[in-house]
Amino acid sequence: MSIVQLTRRQLLVAGTALTMALGAPAFAQTPPGVLVVGQIAEPKALDPAAVTAVNDFRILMNVYDGLVRYKDGTLEVEPALATEWSISEDGTEYTFTLRDGVTFHDGSAFDAEAVKFNFDRMLDENHPFYDTGPFPLSFFFSAIDKVEAVDPKTVKFVLKEPYAPFLSNLAYPTGLIVSPASVEKHGSDFGRNPSGTGPFKFAEWRPNEAVVVEANPDYWDGAPKLQAVVFRPITDASTRTAEMLAGGIDLMVEVPPVALSQFQGETYTLHEQAGPHLWFLILNAKEGPFADKLVRQAANYAINKEAIVNEVLEGTAEVAAGPTPPAFAWAYNENLTPYAYDPDKARELIAEAGADGAELTFYVTEGGSGMLDPVAMGTAIQADLEAVGFDVKIETYEWNTFLGEVNPGLEGKADMAEMAWMTNDPDTLPFLALRSEAFPDKGGFNSGYYSNPEVDALLEKARRATDQEERADLYKQMQEIVHEDAPWVFVANWKQNAVTSDRVEDFQLQPSFFLLLDDVAKN
């Protein structure tokens, strides 16, 4: 029986076990060597250039490699498909030496031309496959002027100007290298027919049921210990918990805080890992009540974030003070303090702004990448805002539908929306979601249309600075201004979690929030 047939069969067994578990004790036995992962949502695509959610990244990082990667347990960059690199004295040229003997899963060669194809495809509007996907995070590489294939094993990136986060961004999923041959073969359907160089090869995608990947025995960094991984989208958190308890999945990500107590004892291992995470509310700064800074500040005072952290999230997070997660210790402004819970101050600001009784439309998701317990959090936030005089209407969406509503911008649709980001560099989130040039119609994620020229200037200067102390000072200045302007409600910095069964060995969470499964085993 093939791995794909085996995983189909085990999914049926797991479903039967769950049905039984809802009525009486039962336990499914997933196959040895096949890791079944309970994901929080159906992936949008398996094309690194077409997705933005960590939910999708968790699959991609096992199918593809980048030129560089994050060193195990850190956000430090180390070699991957490139064995070494040099940087010109002025910081505008990066030259990489590529690894020998690597082929894509479809059998085509990995070389400098393949690397050039990937970045031209993302950045060159005249490239024949430029429209293969929406390339939502191509901002990561906007500093690139051109990519040169110097020879088959040497590739050079020429930047328009020095760009400090460049190497870190190459390690992010947007920088993963795909097979040009498969892109040419499948075109806009490549996201359903992926081919990379990673430890696992794509086998099958059954919509709303499973994505199956099989071990790549010829992987350049050593064959995986697992035979296959099955990524199952289980959007409802209570159902995902029940599946884990019934034995239908071996690894569950983003364990609901209320379910943590169910995974005590020798049968399960609960994993935690701090990382650069921010859970926030996007406020529509272009129109409606939140166009007024006083009302945005009032929302920050009105919401009892300590109660959310302690009662909804069961102490698995800390109250956020601003737009930069404290995990970026070198760039974090420790002088910032979170907005206090002060309903009276909120009412005072609302009255001053003439926004008493304002009606608010609030977009909430049922569950999504890094969104913790979004419905419960949204309901608590609704109650706090209504307690200071707002009239709040919640609209709830499935994750990918939610992104389709929020990412194009809130103008004409909503006043606020939940959001969470896990990032690799202190540049990423503010540059993509707070700059004036990052409005949705310009290709960014500034869905609330916040604009402050001083913030724009600080961010532009910080990404060009090659001295880390200078960068840190610029980011700290940015945080102070954004904290005062309050384009978001700064809610929480989460400590990610996952649970594994006692059959899973050598698993650990990463600060990047990605799942790296090539060293994992399952008996």
Image (cartoon, helix red, strand yellow):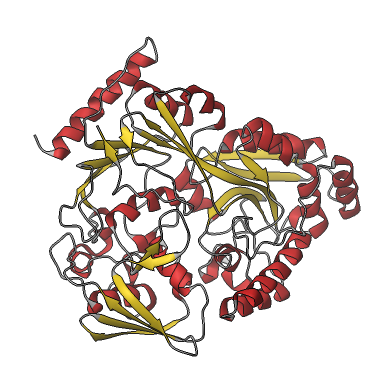
- Kindly indicate the quadrant of the structure image that contains residue 48: bottom left
Residue 268 coordinates in the image, percent (x, y): 41, 27
Residue 291 point in image, percent of width and height: 75, 59
Q: Is residue 138 above or below residue 370?
A: below
Q: Residue at x 24, y 59 (%)?
A: 221
**What is the count of numbered marks?**
0
* Quarter occupied by residue 464: bottom right
Q: Nearer the viewer, residue 189 or 311?
A: 311
> Camera-side residue: 106 or 396?
106
Q: Is residue 471 found left or right of 44 in the rendered image?
A: right
Q: Quadrant of the N terminus?
A: top left
The residue drawn where x is 70% and y is 56% is 322
Task: Out of 257 and 503, give the one closest to the viewer.
Answer: 503
One can see residue 138 in this view: no
From what the image shows, is residue 510 above or below residue 17? below
Give the quadrant of the C terminus. Answer: top left
Q: Is residue 359 left or right of residue 189?
A: right
Q: Residue drawn 33% across and 76% down?
A: 84
Identified at 11% across, 38% down, the residue is 2
Instruction: Indicate the position of residue 167 as horizontal and vertical percent values.
Output: 44, 72
Residue 196 placement, left or right of 172: left
Q: Nearer the viewer, residue 18 or 293?
A: 18
Q: Residue 428: image x %, image y %?
A: 54, 65
Quick check: can you spot residue 146? Answer: yes
The answer to whether 275 is drawn above or below residue 473 in the figure is above
Instruction: Spot the residue most to the left.
Output: 1
